[in-house]
């Protein structure tokens, strides 16, 4: 994903604020606008978020950012991955991952339960009240799932995701992290997948594991899961057109590419609580942010590449999306 909700900026900064660290300096050092904390800026660039999390690991000396009963020394996840990567199947990897956390942490546990058809991956915190916005639960569940997908080089679909808490305000983002059915106020924090995937072989070598760990686990929340929803397929088509500097296809053209009628596509998107217009706006927003953060393309050209006929129309749309103008966003994002 190119962007992540600004909700997560405020979440990961909570412990830093409680320890009287200079929040303004942290934001400046990581090229993040204060508007992300005020709610005026709805999303931030994913690379900025990963950089912020890694910065906070060192500043707080805690990979769990204060959301667990005791601090977690940065590097624990990497150590666990290096240990379990020597085993031959996903079933063995998951069993050893459970064992690794059992002997290294008293406040976080990972359980693996298998029945005739399903595998359940559960995460339990000894003091869940410390994880006020559920960041740590989300991170651990997503990290385990994305890691087993990566180490087996297979997209392993989730059958369901359950959470012990009520539906949070940022639940819309769960569709990206957990592309499956979501159930809240359940007995456990749990992911369900088919039992057959436990037999998959581990295919990554030691060098690939080292490369994988350079940004993990901070970036694992941003890697899309196995997602075949219509809104994701529409977004991918629009993003491909933008990247190729082609005019954005209209709804009829997108429907034809997906081999459905326009009426069916509209209905499917409504069922997924979306629409072609919303997807188009979000796709242009995310690509605009990516271009402003990563490159030195003139602002007028950015707008043209995204299908805006006039610089003024691009500027108006961008300010509606982020709360600031394209020029101000680029200035704040490149300290």
Image (spheres, rainbow, N blue to C red):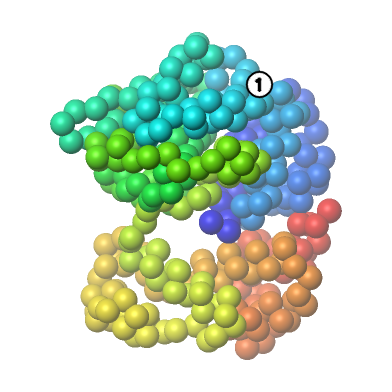
Q: Does 55 sit above or below residue 297?
A: above
Residue 1 seen anywhere in this rendered image of the structure: yes
Asked where in the image residue 14 lies, by quadrant, the reply is top right
Residue 303 % position (x, y):
66, 79
Does 147 sit left or right of 52 as displayed? left
Residue 86 % position (x, y):
49, 30
In the image, what residue occupies the spot 54% across and 14% down? 104
Does 104 sit left or right of 89 as displayed? right
In the image, what residue occupies the spot 43% across and 17% down? 99
Asked where in the image residue 233 lies, by quadrant, the reply is bottom left
Residue 138 seen anywhere in this rendered image of the structure: no
Does 296 sit left or right of 139 as displayed? right
Give the camera-side residue of 155 and 294. 155
Residue 250 % position (x, y):
42, 84
Badge 1: how crowded within 10 Å, few (<14), some, or many (20+)?
Answer: some
Give the camera-side residue of 315 and 263. 263
The count of marks equals 1
In the image, what residue occupies the spot 31% across and 83% down? 256
In the image, what residue occupies the spot 25% across and 78% down? 260
Residue 335 % position (x, y):
84, 53
Q: Does 225 sit above or below residue 272?
A: above
Q: Does 155 sit above or below residue 131?
A: below
Give the camera-side residue of 224 and 14. 224
Query: Which type of secondary structure does the marked residue at label 1 adopt?
Result: loop
Q: Does 149 sit above or below residue 108?
A: below
Q: Which residue is mark 1?
A: 73
């Amino acid at each position: 994903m190119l962007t992540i909700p600004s909700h997560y900026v405020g979440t990961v900064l909570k412990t830093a604020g409680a320890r009287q660290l200079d929040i303004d300096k942290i934001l400046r050092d990581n090229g993040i606008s204060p508007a992300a904390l005020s709610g005026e800026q709805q999303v931030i660039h994913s690379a900025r978020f990963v950089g912020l999390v890694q910065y906070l690991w060192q500043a707080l000396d805690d990979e769990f950012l204060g959301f667990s009963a005791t601090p977690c020394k940065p590097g624990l996840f990497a150590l666990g991955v290096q240990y379990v990567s020597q085993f031959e199947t996903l079933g063995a990897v998951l069993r050893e991952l459970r064992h690794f956390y059992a002997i290294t942490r008293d406040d976080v546990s990972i359980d693996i339960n298998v029945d005739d058809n399903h595998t359940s991956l559960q995460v339990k915190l000894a003091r869940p009240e410390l994880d006020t916005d559920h960041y740590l639960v989300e991170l651990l569940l997503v990290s385990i799932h994305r890691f087993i997908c990566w180490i087996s080089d297979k997209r392993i679909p989730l059958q369901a995701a359950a959470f012990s808490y009520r539906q949070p305000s940022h639940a819309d983002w769960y569709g990206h992290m957990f592309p499956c059915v979501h159930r809240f106020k359940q007995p456990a924090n749990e992911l369900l997948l088919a039992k057959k995937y436990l037999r998959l072989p581990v295919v990554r070598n030691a060098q690939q594991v080292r490369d994988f760990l350079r940004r993990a686990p901070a970036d694992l929340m941003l890697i899309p899961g196995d997602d075949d929803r219509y809104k994701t397929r529409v977004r991918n088509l629009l993003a491909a057109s933008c990247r190729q500097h082609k005019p954005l296809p209209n709804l009829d053209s997108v429907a034809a590419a997906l081999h459905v009628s326009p009426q069916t596509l509209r209905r499917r998107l409504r069922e997924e609580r979306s629409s072609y217009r919303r997807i188009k706006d979000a796709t242009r927003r995310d690509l605009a942010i990516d271009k402003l953060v990563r490159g030195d393309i003139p602002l007028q050209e950015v707008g043209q590449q995204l299908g805006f006929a006039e610089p003024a129309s691009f500027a108006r749309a961008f300010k509606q999306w982020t709360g600031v103008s394209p020029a101000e966003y680029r200035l704040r994002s490149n300290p």
